[in-house]
Image (tube, helix red, strand yellow):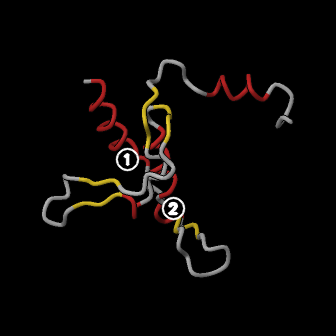
């Protein structure tokens, strides 16, 4: 069974081949990232049930995506979308700049 004719080739082309593959958390929602109140420069990741091998930037992309979701919303499907939480272009640029500087400087 397949999604559509040529799906494997299609999805293979979407993955950059020059990006390192790392062990990623794969669940970067806010409740899985803990920080000390006194010193929020020290982070602790919890809940590794979805961890697996991914392209290096996957966790960052996942985090940016889940910023607009509430996975514990008490009504309807239990998930709510809050577009006001969507990061602004300057916030994404600052986050990506710091991220890339950490790996490529």
Q: Could you tell me which secondary element the residue under label 2 belongs to?
A: loop
60, above or below 73, in the image: above
Left or right: 50 in relation to 35:
right
- Image location of residue 27, percent across then percent down: 48, 52
Q: Secondary structure at mark 1?
A: helix
Task: Determine whether 83 is above or below 55 in the image.
Answer: below
- Res 68 label: 2
Q: In percent of the image, x 60 and y 70: which residue is there?
A: 79
Residue 2 vertical position relative to residue 94 in the rendered view, above or below? above
The quarter of the rendered structure image containing the N terminus is top right
- Residue 21 lies, with reference to residue 69, above or below; the image says above
- The outermost residue toward the left is 38
State which quarter of the image contains the C terminus.
Answer: top left
Residue 6: name its quadrant. top right
Q: Nearer the viewer, residue 62 or 24?
A: 24
Q: Is residue 101 left or right of residue 48?
A: left
Q: Which residue is mark 1?
A: 90
Q: Which of disc 2 and disc 1 is earlier in sequence? A: 2
Rendered location of residue 19, percent (x, y): 46, 23
Local crowd size for mark 2, using a 10 Å CA cut-off: few (<14), some (14–19), many (≥20): some
Asked if labels 2 and 1 touch by Cβ distance under 8 angstroms, the answer is no
How many discs appear? Answer: 2
Given the current orientation, which residue lies at the most extreme front position?
A: 49
In the displayed structure image, the side of residue 103 where residue 87 appears, left or right: right
Q: Residues within 10 Å of mark 1 (few under 14, many from 20)?
A: few
At a point 44% along the width and 36% down the height, the residue shown is: 57
As measured in the structure, the alpha-carbon distance from the residue carrying label 1 to the one carrying label 2 is 17 Å
Q: Nearer the viewer, mark 1 or mark 2?
A: 2
């Amino acid at each position: 069974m397949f999604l559509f004719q040529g799906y494997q080739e299609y999805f293979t082309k979407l993955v950059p081949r020059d990006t390192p593959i790392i062990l990623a958390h794969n669940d970067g929602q806010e409740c899985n990232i803990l920080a000390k109140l006194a010193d929020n420069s020290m982070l602790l990741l919890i809940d590794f049930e979805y961890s697996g091998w991914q392209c290096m930037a996957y966790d960052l992309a996942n985090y940016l995506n889940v910023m607009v979701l509430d996975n514990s919303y008490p009504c309807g499907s239990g998930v709510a979308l809050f577009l006001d939480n969507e990061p602004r272009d300057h916030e994404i640029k600052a986050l990506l700049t710091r991220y890339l500087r950490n790996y490529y400087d």
